[in-house]
Amino acid sequence: MELLWLVYRMFGLCVLKFFVGLISTFIAIGARDARKASKQYKSVLNTYERKNKYAVSHFSSFAHIRAFAYSIVDKMSAICDGKTPIKFDINDDTDWQELQKFLSAGQGVFFICSHLGNIEALCAIPNAADKKMHAFMNVEQNAVFRSFIDRHAKYKNTVIHPTEDIDVAMAGYIYDALGRGELVMMAGDRQSPNTPGKIIESKCLGHACALPAGVFRFARACNCPVFAIANMNVCGGKYRVFVQQIDTKNLDKMASEYMGFVEKLILQYPTQWFNFFDFFIA
């Protein structure tokens, strides 16, 4: 990461992406599990597209992993460099307007994100850094990137909490933070390594999938507005933020609305689904 940062600072984003594009090929060769997950995802996606008479997406697992590598570069430049060429806009629909009402009123909001697009770059959106964000991350699997961000990030209002530390005390702390108008973000599309059996079965692209029950229970228990959120690369260095309010009536409805939001964006941006873990149920 430090070498990539040095290349970026010396030569700029375009040169860094060229460099990353080359090395991502070699990374993909060794990333057997990621290639396997990519192929499974593409198979599910293409089956759904053919069944519903959509245009069929054509990309290799190598291209898919390269897109992920490019997203890491954009993430790094957006979070760590105040002069970044990365640009953002908003999908200004009724859900976004509803979210703005809550934020303007100083109300806390619980965001359920996913491994879709480039969620970590949200803090670079003008004025977003003014609110304190509590984000949960699997620290062991993201140790290198987290360490890099700790050293270089220009946005200091994001607090990273290890998912391994979620207990009654942490739940109380987060509940109080939401009461102060702060924000919380957790990923809803990956089973917890600590509680692999606690899942909600849902459907994505017509195929059964497993969601972490704890995230949806936690969001519902916080008794605050809940929104699905994603930050998608729409072209070049331009990103767009999408949100959808989630009905917290029950867990199944939450999971269904969340996956409907994710599925819609997958169909628009198929190579930006970066969930290289076990997601679909065989």
Image (cartoon, grey):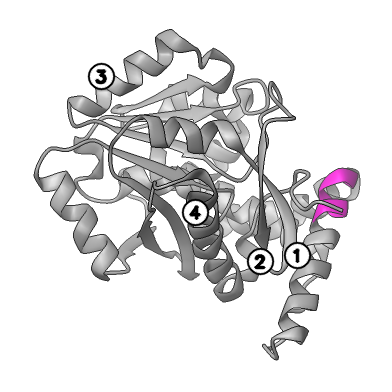
Label 4 close to label 1 by CB (< 8 Å): no
Label 1 CA crowd tier, 10 Å (few <14, some 14–19, many 20+): some
The stretch of residues the image draws in magenta is: 31-37
Camera-near label (2 vs 4) is 4
As for residue 32 lying within the magenta part, the answer is yes
Residue 253's label in the rendered image is 4
User: Which residue sits furthest front?
Assistant: 249
Query: Mark 2 and mark 4: span between their CA atoms?
Result: 27 Å
Residue 176's label in the rendered image is 3
Disc 3 marks a residue whose amino acid type is Asp
User: Which residue sits furthest top?
Assistant: 169
Q: Position of residue 27 (x, y in %)?
A: 81, 46
Camera-near label (3 vs 1) is 3
User: Closest to the observer: 169 or 152?
Assistant: 169
Q: Residue at x 75, y 65 (%)?
A: 63
User: Closest to the observer: 247 or 91?
Assistant: 247
Camera-near label (2 vs 1) is 2
Camera-near label (3 vs 2) is 3
Disc 4 marks a residue whose amino acid type is Lys
* Residue under pointer 2: 271
* Residue under pointer 1: 63
Q: Residue at x 47, y 62 (%)?
A: 232
Q: Main secondary structure of the magenta part?
A: helix
Label 2 CA crowd tier, 10 Å (few <14, some 14–19, many 20+): many
Is 101 above or below relative to 43?
above
Left or right of 76 in this view: 16: right
Label 2 close to label 1 by CB (< 8 Å): yes
- The quarter in which the N terminus is drawn is top right
Element marked by disc 2: helix
Q: Residue at x 39, y 43 (%)?
A: 111
Query: Mark 2 and mark 1: span between their CA atoms?
Result: 8 Å
